[in-house]
Image (cartoon, helix red, strand yellow):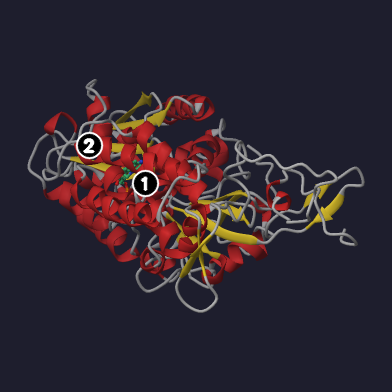
Amino acid sequence: MKSNDSVSKYPGQTRLALRNIDEIDPHKIGDYIDRDGYLALGKALKMSPDDIIKTIDDSGLRGRGGAGFPTGKKWSFVRAAQGDTKYVICNADEGDPGAFMDRAILEGDPHSVLEAMTIAGFAVGATKGFIYVRAEYPLAVSNLEIAIKQSHGKGFLGKNILGSKFDFDIELRLGAGAFVCGEETALIASIEGRRGEPTPKPPFPANSGLYKKPTLINNVETLTVIPMIILRGATYFNTIGTATSKGTKVFALAGNIKNGGLVEVPMGTSLKTLVYDIGGGAPSVFVGPNKVEMKRAVKAVQIGGPSGGCIPASMFDTGLDYESVKKLGAILGSGGLVVMDEKTCMVDIAKFFIKFSVDESCGKCVPCRIGNRKLLGILEKITSGKGAESDIDELVNLGKTIISTSLCGLGQSSPNPVLSTIANYRDEYLAHCGIKRAEGSGVQGVTPWCPAGVCFKKKAKYCINEKCISCGRCAPICPVNAIHKEGEK
Ligand SMILES: Cc1cc2nc3c(=O)[nH]c(=O)nc-3n(C[C@H](O)[C@H](O)[C@H](O)COP(=O)(O)O)c2cc1C
C-alpha cells in the first residue's frame, strides 16, 4: 500500500508503528515475513508468559488509545484474573475527527496486529481474540480478513500454533459508527449484541469484560509495536521518548496545514517541529482574479479530538508527551492533530466539538445527555451575538460539573474543548458577547464581534458603495479576502 501524503516520507521520523507501511504489500504474508514478521511470535511462544509481560512492562509502553495506561500492567491484571476463559480485544473503532492512524496500520500492516494479539493471548491466557473495527473502514476489514486466512494457512493462528500446543483464533466484529462504542465497556456491550452503552467501572474489563470474562483490550497502535518490542527487547523501545512517555507516537496532521498526513516521531517531540518543520505551517490562500498569495499564520492546534483541547501557537515549544500536554488542559489522545490558522474562530471550534459530543452521546447518563446539549445552547447563543459574560462563566461551571459527574470518558472529557478555548482565548468569547478588554484595565461594550470573521456571517451584510466609510468590518468576514486598504495588495 502506498500512502500519497507528503509527510509520510519526512526523514526525521522514527517509524516503529508505521515500520511496514509503504514497505510491504499487505495482501502478501511473505512480505511481512521477509521483514521479520512472526519471528516475535516464535520467540514469545518459547518465553514464559511472565517474561513476556515483564518485557512489555520494562519497555514503558502506554496505551495509545487515549488514556495512556501502562500496557504491561494491564496485561498482568488480565493474566492474574481468575477464569478458564479469557479474551483479547483489539480496539479499532477509531472515531476522533481528523484521526486515521489506526486505519493506516490496519490497511497497510494487518499482520502486525494479528501477531501482537496472538502474543497477548499467550501471555494473558486467552485463546480467542476479537478485532472491533469500524464498518466505515472497508479496506481495513477486507485486508484483515485476508490476513487472518493467510495466517491460518501458515500455522500462525488456529490450533497448536508453531507446535507450541497453544491455540488462538481471531474474529472480526464490525462497529456501526458510534463514537461511544470506542469506549471499552460500550465496545464490549456492542460485541455481545447489546446496545453500545458504557457501564460503570469497576469492574474493569481485566476482571469482568466480554461475557463477564477477564478481557484484555488494547488499541491498534499499542498492539502493532508489541512484536518489535519482543523481538528487539525492552531497551530498544524505552530509550526512545521521555522519562515517562516511552517510544514513538503516530500523529495525523490535518486541518490548515501544508503537508498533511501521518507522521511518527519520538514522544516529547515539540509541536513546533511537527507543525512547522514537518507540516510546513499553514498553507497560503490565493485570492482575486490575479490569484494574489495571502500568507496565513497558524493560530492553534486541536489535539486529542473531542476529549482534547486547543493549544495556542505561543505554546508550541511544548513536547508531545502525556504529562506535558495534560498540563495545558488538553490530552495527547490517540494522535489526531487538527491545525487551525488565524481565520479560525475558537468559539466556533468549541461549538463544533460540543455538537459532535451531543450527537455521539449515548444518552445513558444525564450530565452528558443534558449537560452537553446545554453547553451547545449557550455556545449557539454566544455565536449568534446574544451572549453575555455570565454565559462564559456558566460554560465553565457547567463544563466542570459534566466532567466530574458523567458516567464514562465521553462526558468526562467532552467539555475540554470549551474549557481550553475559554482559558486561552477568553477575549474571543468576550468579543462575541460585545465586550472588549480596554487597553488598561476593565472592559468596554462594543457590538458583538467575531475577531476571526466566522460567526454572524448570515446576519451581517456589508455593502461597499458610495456610503462606505472604510470602517473595515467587512474585511475579516469576506470569504475570499478581497477587501484591502487602498494601496495594499
Ligand atoms: C468515548 C470514547 C471513545 C474511545 N474510542 C477509542 C477508539 O476509537 N480506539 C481506542 O483504541 N480507544 C478508544 N477509547 C479508549 C478505550 O476505552 C480504551 O481505553 C482503549 O481501547 C484501551 O487500549 P490502550 O490501553 O491500548 O490504549 C475511547 C474512550 C472513550 C471514552
Residue type at mark 1 is Gly
Residue type at mark 2 is Thr
Above or below: residue 191 compared with residue 16: above
Residue 127 appears anywhere in the view: no
* Mark 1 vs 2, N-terminal side: 1
Would you say 186 lies left or right of 91 here?
left
| Residue 478, disc | none
View extreme (front): residue: 467
On the rendering, which quadrant does ligand 1 occupy?
top left
Q: Which residue is mark 2?
A: 185
Query: Which residue is nearer to you in this view: 400 or 234?
Result: 400
Under circle 1, the secondary element is: helix
Residue 336: image location, x then y, percent = 49, 49
Under circle 2, the secondary element is: helix
Residue 465: image location, x then y, percent = 83, 43
Place residue 325 in its image quadrant: bottom left
Q: Which residue is mark 1?
A: 42
Q: Disc 2, ligand 1: is the CB inside 8 Å?
A: yes
View extreme (left): residue: 82
At 63% from the left and 37% from the top, the residue drawn is 1
Residue 459: image location, x then y, percent = 60, 37
Q: Residues within 10 Å of mark 1 (few under 14, many from 20)?
A: some
Q: Disc 1, ligand 1: is the CB inside 8 Å?
A: no
Number of numbered markers: 2
Q: CA distance from mark 1 to mark 2?
A: 32 Å
Query: Which residue is nearer to you in this view: 346 or 238?
Result: 346
Would you say 300 lies left or right of 185 here?
right
- Nearer the camera: disc 1 or disc 2: 2
